[in-house]
């Protein structure tokens, strides 16, 4: 069978060799295919495209193993090897993208030969555009410079991630200063021989402290420590990164980096980004005021003279507003979310929704915490003889790895990583969820995050059965990619769904009234949230767009000053004096100028979700909802990147997506 899952090493010692071999052999296969294209390309255009696509698939495998293991492997040596494998893969990609002889192969292809094959036509168009964006048609000196710039960008990006990944800060506090924190959290944080408790800036430590600690100094200190991660080391890295991205964009004919970046996204043009940011900021103005008034009123009961609520007190007081105004006690909520049950519940819910079955498999992984499942279309019972179901093939659809608890040296956030991209009959899609959840009781927020990230994983698996690596998995426009995940979050907010797995220690399922209150409480703060997101989006856009000033002989603004200014214009909460939050804003790496994409996707997610439950009846596992879910699965998820996202969404909705559902939700 050609599309069997990968076999990972079973012995700890074997990982070093395996990682090297996997990366090296995939790179070699990729290079051999490309060498063939360069020297003796097939005469048939589709065959040329196929050979190129397979080469990219092998290169993708090398990059994926590098990226994954560099972020999750417990051995520092393997992480280092993996980082360097990822760099090698990027280097090869850069070299190919600037290879004139290779470009000429595609430039010379006869479009007539692919005219009858829409996917191949689309691929040819994309490949040509990719090459032009890479600057392959520039003169030799420019191409050399582009190559050096891209290599340095990759290094800077990795260095930026590494610094903020490794820069864990700590505060030490007296045990009595932690009053307000949940019992299980306190039990996991005993005092040391000096009688002090160490609290780190890792999420499982810092988030509950900011939310629950009664002691204001502790909240302030952990907020400052969290905001200061990466400072000052990352500022020169970021400054160089923004300058080089700008240079790269202008070398290939764009006016700035955001324009270059937006060209392959739904947003289309760089200048549409600040327009979108302003549109959201305006729609969020009244909801934000409403949220802030409510927050300040509560805050003044404790601090009568306060003019505003400081950022470090936001989580704590927002929590108080929620628990007092909406009668939601997070600690009570937590008691219903036992990690192991939540994980099972997630599989049950998404299984029903999308017609899938997950079979636990006992195979080697990089760490004992990782659980592995094979994914099947439920109604074929894994038997190929039953034939396919809907848009899905029969048999094993993919393999997923859930790596959900924190450990030292591991990626600090929550994300889906690729192990392999899927192509029908050739390679099984395999993906990995990397998160940092506690082992016992979970915050409901984390449950929502789990649903969200799992949405990416499903997209990766379901879209892994086409004919082309280029369109496999989440290979859709980057400003659409969050929409399926944001929409899946809705299922973590409904009683009929939650009661399947959210039960307390005595076996009582979570009461519907509590879930309703949780939703009302969650709605509190959405104006503040939208404005905070627009502050981040503005930072991500303007840090890059400001480089145009340097072209004109002016100085680019100081990053800290620019951040403070944008926080003043878009943010909801005041700047925390003396801090440098941008220094650990990891999305400046991966998302570059495109942080707006979160909100762009959310606008679409809200619009799509309205199709599932048009009457707001609320039973998100009702037969009518499941029917819509299958249609959505086949129309939006399964096609991956084989069509423009705007078209996939329009196919599902029966009309183009609109801003109105989101704006109405925000104003509610
Ligand atoms: Zn996401």
Image (tube, helix red, strand yellow):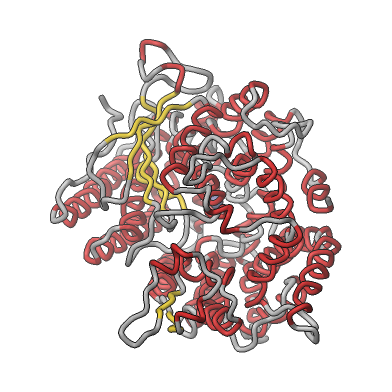
**From what the image shows, is residue 438 above or below residue 556?**
above
Going by the picture, which residue comes out furthest to the front?
506
Count up the numbered dots: 0
Between residue 440 and residue 602, name the one nearer to us. Answer: 440
Residue 608 visible here: yes
Expressed as whole percent of the image width and height from the top left, the position of residue 123 reads: 51, 37
Expressed as whole percent of the image width and height from the top left, the position of residue 87 reads: 34, 62
Expressed as whole percent of the image width and height from the top left, the position of residue 248 reads: 53, 67
Residue 271 visible here: no
Q: Tell me where residue 400 sits by quadrant.
A: top left
Between residue 286 and residue 323, name the one nearer to us. Answer: 323
In percent of the image, x 52 and y 34: which residue is there? 350
- In the image, taking residue 297 as reference, residue 26 lies left or right, namely left
Between residue 307 and residue 303, name the one nearer to us. Answer: 303
**From what the image shows, is residue 121 above or below residue 60?**
above
In percent of the image, x 44 and y 23: which residue is there? 377
Going by the picture, which residue comes out furthest to the top?
385
- In the image, taking residue 170 as reference, residue 319 lies left or right, namely right
In percent of the image, x 58 and y 80: which residue is there? 215
Expressed as whole percent of the image width and height from the top left, the position of residue 607 reads: 74, 40
**From what the image shows, is residue 540 above or below residue 662?**
below
- In the image, taking residue 213 as reference, residue 313 lies left or right, namely right
Q: Tell me where residue 6 sits by quadrant.
A: top left
In which quadrant is the N terminus drawn?
A: top left
């Amino acid at each position: 069978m050609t599309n069997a899952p990968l076999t990972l090493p079973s012995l700890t010692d074997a990982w070093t060799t395996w990682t090297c071999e996997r990366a090296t052999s995939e790179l070699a296969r990729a290079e051999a295919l490309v060498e063939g294209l360069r020297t003796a390309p097939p005469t048939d255009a589709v065959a040329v495209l196929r050979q190129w696509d397979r080469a990219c698939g092998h290169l993708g495998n090398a990059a994926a193993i590098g990226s994954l293991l560099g972020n999750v492997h417990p051995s520092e040596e393997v992480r280092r090897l993996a980082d360097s494998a990822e760099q090698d893969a990027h280097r090869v990609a850069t070299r190919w993208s600037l290879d004139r002889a290779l470009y000429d192969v595609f430039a010379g292809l006869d479009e007539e030969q692919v005219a009858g094959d829409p996917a191949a036509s689309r691929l040819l168009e994309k490949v040509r555009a990719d090459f032009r964006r890479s600057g392959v048609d520039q003169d030799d000196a420019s191409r050399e410079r582009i190559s050096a710039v891209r290599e340095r960008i990759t290094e800077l990006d990795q260095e930026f991630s590494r610094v903020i990944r490794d820069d864990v800060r700590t505060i030490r506090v007296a045990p009595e200063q932690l009053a307000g924190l949940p019992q299980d959290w306190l039990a996991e944080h005993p005092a040391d021989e000096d009688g002090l408790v160490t609290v780190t800036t890792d999420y499982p430590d810092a988030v509950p402290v900011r939310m629950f600690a009664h002691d204001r100094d502790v909240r302030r200190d952990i907020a400052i420590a969290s905001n200061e991660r990466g400072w000052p080391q990352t500022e020169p890295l970021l400054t160089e990164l923004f300058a080089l991205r700008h240079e790269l964009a202008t070398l290939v004919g764009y006016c700035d980096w955001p324009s270059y970046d937006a060209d392959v996204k739904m947003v289309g043009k760089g200048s549409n980004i600040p327009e979108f940011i302003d549109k959201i900021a305006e729609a969020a103005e009244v909801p934000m005021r409403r949220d802030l008034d409510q927050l300040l009123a509560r805050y003044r009961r404790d601090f009568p003279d306060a003019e505003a609520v400081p950022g470090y007190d936001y989580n704590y007081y927002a929590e108080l507003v929620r628990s007092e105004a909406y009668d939601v006690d997070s600690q009570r909520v937590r008691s219903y979310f036992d990690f192991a049950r939540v994980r099972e519940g997630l599989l049950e819910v998404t299984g029903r929704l999308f017609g899938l079955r997950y079979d636990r498999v006992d195979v080697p992984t990089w760490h004992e915490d990782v659980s592995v499942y094979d994914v099947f279309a439920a109604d074929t019972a894994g038997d190929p003889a039953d034939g396919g179901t809907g848009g899905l093939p029969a048999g094993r659809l993919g393999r997923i790895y859930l790596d959900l608890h924190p450990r030292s040296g591991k990626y600090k956030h929550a994300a889906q990583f690729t192990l392999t991209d899927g192509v029908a009959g050739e390679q099984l899609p395999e993906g990995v969820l990397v998160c940092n959840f506690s082992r016992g009781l979970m915050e409901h927020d984390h449950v929502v995050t789990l649903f969200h990230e799992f949405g990416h994983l499903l997209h990766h698996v379901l879209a892994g059965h086409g004919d082309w690596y280029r369109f496999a998995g989440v290979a859709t426009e980057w400003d659409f990619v969050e929409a399926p995940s944001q929409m899946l979050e809705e299922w973590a907010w409904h009683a009929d769904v939650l009661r399947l797995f959210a039960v307390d220690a005595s076996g009582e399922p979570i009461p519907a009234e509590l879930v309703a209150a949780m939703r009302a409480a969650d709605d509190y703060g959405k104006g503040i949230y939208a404005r905070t997101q627009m502050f981040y989006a503005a930072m991500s856009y303007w840090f890059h767009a400001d480089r145009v000033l340097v072209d004109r002989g002016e100085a680019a603004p100081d990053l800290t000053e620019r951040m403070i200014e944008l926080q003043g214009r878009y943010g909801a909460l005041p700047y925390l004096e003396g801090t440098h939050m941008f220094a650990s804003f990891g999305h400046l790496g991966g998302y570059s100028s495109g942080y707006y994409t979160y909100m762009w996707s959310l606008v679409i997610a809200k619009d799509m979700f309205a199709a599932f439950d048009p009457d707001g009846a609320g039973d998100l596992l009702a037969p009518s909802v499941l029917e819509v879910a299958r249609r959505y699965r086949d129309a939006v998820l399964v096609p991956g990147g084989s069509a423009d996202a705007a078209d996939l969404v329009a196919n599902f909705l029966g009309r183009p997506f609109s801003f109105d559902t989101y704006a109405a939700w925000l104003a509610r």
